[in-house]
Amino acid sequence: MYAVHISIKVQNQLAKKSIILSLKDWSHHLFQKENGLILRIFMDKAENQIDIFHVFENKALMEKVRRESSNEFWDQIKEMGGQVSRFDGVSEVEMTKNFKDYEINFK
């Protein structure tokens, strides 16, 4: 698996919420098998900061998505004055064997 960690700092809470909604709306197709996104986590850091974690099936699929569409999305945030930093690398994902017991409803 291959993970990407993106940290975003923007002017205010409204800009942060707008980015989250835009990302959710824009990226539904990433969860399709041919694009390889397995998991996405949003973590609030502050009123105007958010961290986003993406886990892809492999690096090749992540690079395909980045090349085809995501670079433009992050560039637009930077054009609005937002600060975007991104780190990625090979990852190992562990999960509880009792995952179903948590009654998590995925969107």
Image (tube, helix red, strand yellow):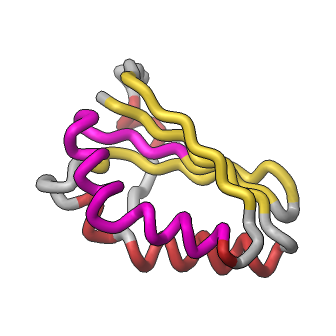
Above or below for 20 versus 58: below
Above or below for 85 versus 18: above
In the figure, residue 76 lies in which quadrant?
bottom right
Task: Give the quarter of the figure containing the N terminus.
Answer: top left
| Residue 96 on image: x %, y % | 42, 22
* Residue in view at x 27 percent, y 59 percent: 31
Taking the image as shown, residue 68 lies to the left or right of residue 80, namely: left
Viewer-closest of 77 and 28: 77
In the figure, residue 54 lies in which quadrant?
top left
Viewer-closest of 71 and 40: 71
User: What segment is highlighted magenta in the picture?
Assistant: 53-78
Tell me, yes or no, whether the highlighted magenta stretch contains residue 70.
Answer: yes
Tell me, yes or no, whether the highlighted magenta stretch contains residue 3.
Answer: no
**Number of numbered labels in the structure image:** 0
| Residue 69 on image: x %, y % | 34, 67
Taking the image as shown, residue 80 lies to the left or right of residue 96, namely: right
Task: Give the quarter of the figure containing the C terminus.
Answer: bottom left
In the figure, residue 29 lies in which quadrant?
bottom left
Viewer-closest of 94 and 31: 31
* Residue in view at x 60 percent, y 70 percent: 20
| Residue 6 on image: x %, y % | 59, 47
* Residue in view at x 29 percent, y 46 percent: 63
* Residue in view at x 35 percent, y 21 percent: 97
Taking the image as shown, residue 82 lies to the left or right of residue 60, namely: right
Taking the image as shown, residue 40 lies to the left or right of residue 57, namely: right
| Residue 92 on image: x %, y % | 38, 19
Viewer-closest of 99 and 64: 64
Dominant secondary structure (helix, strand or loop) of the stretch shown in magenta: helix
